[in-house]
């Protein structure tokens, strides 16, 4: 059975629109640029579409080595230097801020006053854009419930990667009155081939020379119910998923991954299944 990597996504600023790529670099804490920045409120708590659905209207793109963020609500745009992520000396010069994401506390560096003003105006709440420096060590699953080795993660919710099969979404859409796009689920990797939910059955697989380990099904939240083009909420897909994808009272869709190895990956690459559960 053949599985092919069909889509790659990164989300440079947590909970904003993602960027579809043909290739990317796998780094220690995830894909290059993925969730290296996030918005925090005036108490340093992380912000997501769960509480601020209008974040969906902030779309990202890479233009001339800068991250362009377009507010589709009022057509305004800000350009953020990506050099901040690549150059640790630049990050060292920025103002530091204690930030909290779920139960983790770490240091974020404030990107700029201009960025804070742009996002505060866009969301109607005072907030700051912070970036994670390379010396920040946010550990995956510190309680060692799902992984026993130490892995790093960016400002993603909990794990460096999320993978979903196109057949899994096709199966869900057959059960819905209206088809939903993959962007409701914010994966890093999408693949073709096989049967619905084959990703649940993998213990390890390779893309190129990089080994990935599916370690935990992804528990889905209300972000999946937010239309990523309009920021409007509905009951789906959680209402339907709850009828057949519930484990311990949590709705599961997609697999969280950790990995070993770094390097480039690109679409149309084969996923070599090394071990099944």
Image (spheres, rainbow, N blue to C red):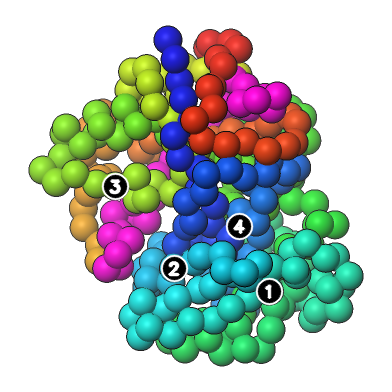
Q: Which residue is mark 1?
A: 81
Q: Which residue is mark 3?
A: 181
N-terminal of the two: label 3 or label 2? 2
Q: Residue at x 31, y 27 (%)?
A: 167
Q: Is residue 226 magenta?
A: yes
Q: Pointer 1 and pointer 4: residues touching (CB < 8 Å)?
A: no
Q: Residue at x 49, y 30 (%)?
A: 268
Quick one: SS at disc 3? loop
N-terminal of the two: label 1 or label 3? 1
Nearest to the eye among marks 4 and 2: give it.
Answer: 2
* Left or right of residue 87: residue 245: left
Bin the neighbour count of mark 2 within 10 Å (Cα to Cα): few under 14, some 14-19, many 20 and up.
many
Quick one: SS at disc 1? strand
N-terminal of the two: label 4 or label 3? 4
Quick one: SS at disc 4? loop
Q: Residue at x 52, y 12 (%)?
A: 277
Q: Quadrant of residue 219?
A: top left
Q: Which residue is mark 2?
A: 59
- Using the image, determine if residue 273 lies above or below residue 106: above
Magenta span covers which residues? 205-231
N-terminal of the two: label 1 or label 4? 4
Q: CA distance from mark 1 to mark 2?
A: 16 Å
Q: Which residue is mark 4?
A: 35
- Using the image, determine if residue 103 lies above or below residue 231: above
Q: Is residue 137 magenta?
A: no
Task: Provide residue 261's location: percent of width, then percent of height.
Answer: 75, 31
Quick one: SS at disc 2? strand
N-terminal of the two: label 1 or label 2? 2
């Amino acid at each position: 059975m053949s599985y092919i990597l069909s889509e790659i996504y990164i989300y440079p600023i947590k909970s904003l629109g993602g960027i579809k790529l043909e290739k990317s670099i796998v780094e220690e804490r995830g894909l290059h640029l993925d969730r290296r920045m996030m918005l925090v409120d005036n108490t340093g708590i992380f912000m997501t579409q769960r509480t601020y659905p209008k974040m969906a209207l902030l779309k990202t793109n890479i233009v001339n080595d800068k991250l362009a963020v377009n507010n589709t609500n009022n057509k305004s745009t800000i350009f953020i230097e990506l050099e901040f992520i690549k150059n640790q000396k630049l990050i060292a010069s920025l103002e530091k801020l204690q930030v909290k994401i779920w139960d983790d506390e770490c240091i974020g560096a404030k990107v700029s006053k201009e960025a804070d003003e742009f996002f505060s105006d866009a969301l109607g709440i005072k907030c700051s854009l912070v970036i994670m420096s390379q010396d920040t060590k946010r550990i995956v699953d510190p309680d060692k419930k799902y992984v026993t080795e130490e892995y790093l993660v960016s400002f993603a919710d909990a794990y460096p990667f999320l993978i979903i099969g196109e057949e899994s979404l096709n199966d869900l859409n057959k059960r819905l009155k209206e088809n939903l796009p993959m962007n409701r689920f914010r994966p890093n990797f999408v693949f073709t081939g096989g049967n619905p939910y084959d990703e649940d059955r993998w213990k390890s697989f390779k893309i190129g020379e990089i080994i990935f380990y599916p370690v935990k099904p992804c528990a889905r939240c209300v972000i999946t119910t937010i239309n990523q083009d309009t920021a409007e909420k509905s009951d789906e897909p959680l209402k339907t998923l709850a009828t057949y994808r519930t484990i311990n009272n949590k709705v599961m869709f997609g697999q969280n991954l950790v990995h070993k190895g770094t390097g480039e990956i690109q679409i149309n690459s084969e996923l070599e299944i090394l071990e099944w559960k």
